Structures are given as C-alpha cells and as structure tokens.
Amino acid sequence: MTAALERTLILGGARSGKSAHAEQLALASGKELIYIATAQAHDAEMASRIGQHRQRRDDNAGARWITVEEPLALGAALTQWCAPQRLVLVDCLTVWLSNLLFSEARDYPAVGQIDPPACFVEQRALFLQALAQAAGDVVLVSNEVGMGIVPQGAVSRWFVDEAGRLNQASAAVCERALFIVAGLPVVLKG
C-alpha cells in the first residue's frame, strides 16, 4: 500500500482466497493491524470457519492483529478504529449484510417486495459515510454472490440484490477494487 490513505475492496466467491489476499495486503502495509470480524458463531460450522481465519492470522509470524468483533455497527467501528498509523481490515461485508437483513425476527414473504429492516437502512448509511471519511487505510472483503443462477426464493434474491448494491456502493468509495479468482487477484480499479 502507498503512504497515502487508501480504501480497497476485495471481492471473490466462497473459498476464492479473498481473505488470505486481504491479510497479505494488510501485513505488507507495515501498519498497526485492526481486524474487524463481522461473523457470529451461531453454529458449529461457522465457529469452525471463524477458527480457520483466526489460525491463519496467528500463523503469520510477527503479525499482531487486534481483533474487533462487530456484527452490526460497522460504521461506528470504522470511525473508532481508523487512524493514519493503522490498517483496518473488515471481513466480511456480506456476513455483515446478513446480520443486518435478518437482525429482526419476522416472517418473510415467499414472493413480492421485501422491505429491509430499519436498522439495515441506518447502518448501511453510517457504514458508507464512515468509509468515505476513513482516517486510515481500509481493506474490505466481500463475497460476489450475483454471478450464478438467480435464486428461486424471494428472500435469497433480496439478499443477492442487496449484496450487489452494497458492493457497488463500496467500490464507488474505494480507490482500489480487486476480484480474487482461484487465489489470483484481478485488478478492477486502481
């Protein structure tokens, strides 16, 4: 990363290598490393995924990550932790999106328009504002979920649509955007 403050969005599919690539960029910065984790271990499979991510960070000799767990208030976390001497890595936006979209217990229609919960609208706006005003380097990791078959259910289509909108809005603010395919970075922007 350059000496100038920079925001980078790293997109990719599941197990594409996007998180590992993001961590390598962070390590190369030479800055204090803040890892904002958005995942919550609601089941054994997610706990295992979180453990794999932690282990990979721990395996990087000399890397000293400060881990911040923030499943909902991502904008506030960016505002709190971003500083010129730091690099903040957020992993991942689509998990954060799931947290927000499904934070309220409610019935979702099988078909038709689904209105997002109020917390999603507010938190998304706060996140994008904090990203635009970040006082330090930020690396965002996000899944690209809209490249496959259009999902059958209304809720799944809603999630894919909102993920696409979030990725577009984030990329518009970021100076750099990369797409990771089979562990290889493809430069989209910057």
Image (cartoon, grey):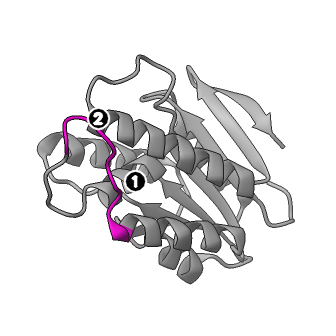
Residue type of the residue flagged with mark 2? Ala
Left or right: 33 in relation to 74? right
Left or right: 182 in relation to 3? left
Viewport quadrant of the N terminus: bottom right
Nearest the camera: 133 or 66? 133
Check contact, mark 2 vs mark 1: CB within 8 A.
Answer: no
Left or right: 188 in relation to 76? right
Checking the image for residue 97, the label placed there is 1
Checking the image for residue 176, the label placed there is none
Taking the spot 42% from the left edge, 29% from the top edge, the residue there is 14
Q: Give the range drawn in magenta.
A: 109-119
User: Which residue is under mark 2?
Assistant: 154
Spatial distance from mark 2 to mark 1, Cα to Cα? 16 Å
Marked residue nearer the N-terminal end (2 or 1):
1
Q: Is residue 64 visible?
A: yes
- Seen in the picture, residue 108 relative to 131 is either above or below; the reply is above
Taking the spot 47% from the left edge, 44% from the top edge, the residue there is 163
Percent of width and height locating residue 63: 55, 58
Nearest the camera: 153 or 89? 153
